[in-house]
């Protein structure tokens, strides 16, 4: 799969993305993650499409933060460059859900088990040993901290956490919902029509969410709101969610067995 992310003259990111696009092992992990999620559990996808959407969102968020004079943690604490922070975000995004090949429960920890050798191979010879080691720690931290209850300690980990939640358009919400009977998760997920991420007027990032039905507030509040509050990004993000005209009826009838 082609990740298809905007490189923006970041040569180190270009080299890493090229390895991602060529990795048969990573592609197999994504396919296996979806077998667990979709085929065996009947929930929404956690494979290559989610990864591609999330990675593009993550890069967008990080670059808006940098434009707003927010310093990434890799720069502040390791004296690396903004371009290296982009590598952290991209690799954490592509690896954060691979633990699903083992099980959904505790998949964050399972991803941490599988990710280290992949990080080594995907970083390749782009960096010296010391820098590769520091980047690996930052990437693993971002994978670990994408759990709702874990507080991220870096800007990059906060970006990954919020990017994961923002893959929510038209039924793609990150709160897993069954593909069968309707629930508050599935109904509210179908209400999200469009998510726009732009530079804010008062903060570096503005997230504008269009909903076809007010039921979408459940996704915005329970998923995005919770993750945003428990992240390093909350001081830098403003969120506006509104229902478009002619509110759409999503569910005609609901019964309890």
Image (cartoon, helix red, strand yellow):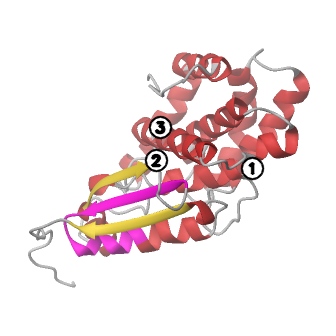
Q: Nearer the viewer, mark 1 or mark 3?
A: 3
Question: Toward which corner of the image does residue 76 lie, by quadrant?
Answer: top right
Q: Is residue 202 above or below residue 2?
A: below
Question: Toward which corner of the image does residue 7 lie, by quadrant?
Answer: top right
Q: Is residue 250 above or below residue 41?
A: below
Marks 3/2: CA–CA distance: 24 Å
Marks 2/1: CA–CA distance: 24 Å
Q: Point out the tag, 2 or 1, that comes first from the N-terminus.
A: 2
The residue wearing badge 1 is: 141
For the residues bearing labels 2 and 1, Cβ distance under 8 angstroms: no
- Residue 56: image tag: 3
* Residue 179 in view: yes
Q: What residue is drawn where x is 70% and y is 37%? A: 85
Say few, some or many: other residues with alpha carbon within 10 Å of mark 3 (under 14 / 14 to 19 / 20 or more). some
Q: What residue is drawn where x is 26% and y is 54%? A: 170
Q: What residue is drawn where x is 74% and y is 18%? A: 124
The residue wearing badge 2 is: 36
Q: Which element is circle 2 on?
A: helix
* Residue 101 in view: no
Residue 256 placed where, x, y %?
21, 85
- Residue 108 or residue 41, whichever sits in front: 108
Residue 52 placed where, x, y %?
45, 35
Instruction: Locate residue 116 relative to residue 188 in the image: left or right.
Output: right
Give the magenta part as a residue range: 204-220
Q: Point out the tag, 1 or 3, that comes first from the N-terminus.
A: 3
- Residue 24 magenta-highlighted: no
| Image quarter in which the N terminus is found | top left
Residue 182 placed where, x, y %?
24, 70
């Amino acid at each position: 799969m082609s990740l298809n992310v905007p490189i923006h003259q970041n040569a180190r990111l270009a080299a890493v993305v090229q390895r991602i696009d060529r990795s048969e092992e990573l592609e197999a992990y994504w396919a296996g993650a979806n077998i667990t999620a979709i085929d065996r559990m009947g929930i929404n996808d956690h494979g290559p499409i989610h990864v591609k959407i999330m990675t593009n969102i993550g890069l967008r968020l990080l670059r808006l933060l940098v434009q707003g004079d927010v310093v990434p943690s890799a720069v502040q604490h390791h004296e690396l460059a903004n371009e290296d922070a982009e590598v952290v975000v991209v690799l954490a995004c592509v690896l954060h859900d691979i633990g699903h090949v083992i099980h959904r429960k505790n998949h964050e920890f399972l991803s941490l088990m599988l990710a280290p050798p992949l990080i080594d191979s995907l970083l390749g010879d782009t960096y010296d040993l010391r820098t590769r080691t520091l980047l690996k720690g930052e990437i693993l931290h971002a994978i670990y901290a994408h759990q709702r209850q874990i507080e991220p300690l870096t800007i990059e980990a906060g970006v990954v956490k919020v990017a994961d939640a923002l893959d929510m358009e038209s039924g793609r919400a990150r709160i897993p919902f069954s593909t069968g009977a309707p629930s508050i998760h599935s109904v509210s997920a179908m209400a999200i029509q469009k998510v726009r991420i732009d530079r804010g007027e008062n903060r570096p990032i503005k997230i504008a969410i269009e909903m076809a039905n007010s039921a979408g507030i459940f996704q915005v509040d329970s998923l995005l709101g919770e993750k945003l509050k428990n992240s390093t990004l909350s001081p830098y993000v403003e969120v506006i969610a509104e229902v478009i005209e002619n509110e759409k009826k999503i569910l005609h009838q609901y019964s309890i067995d």
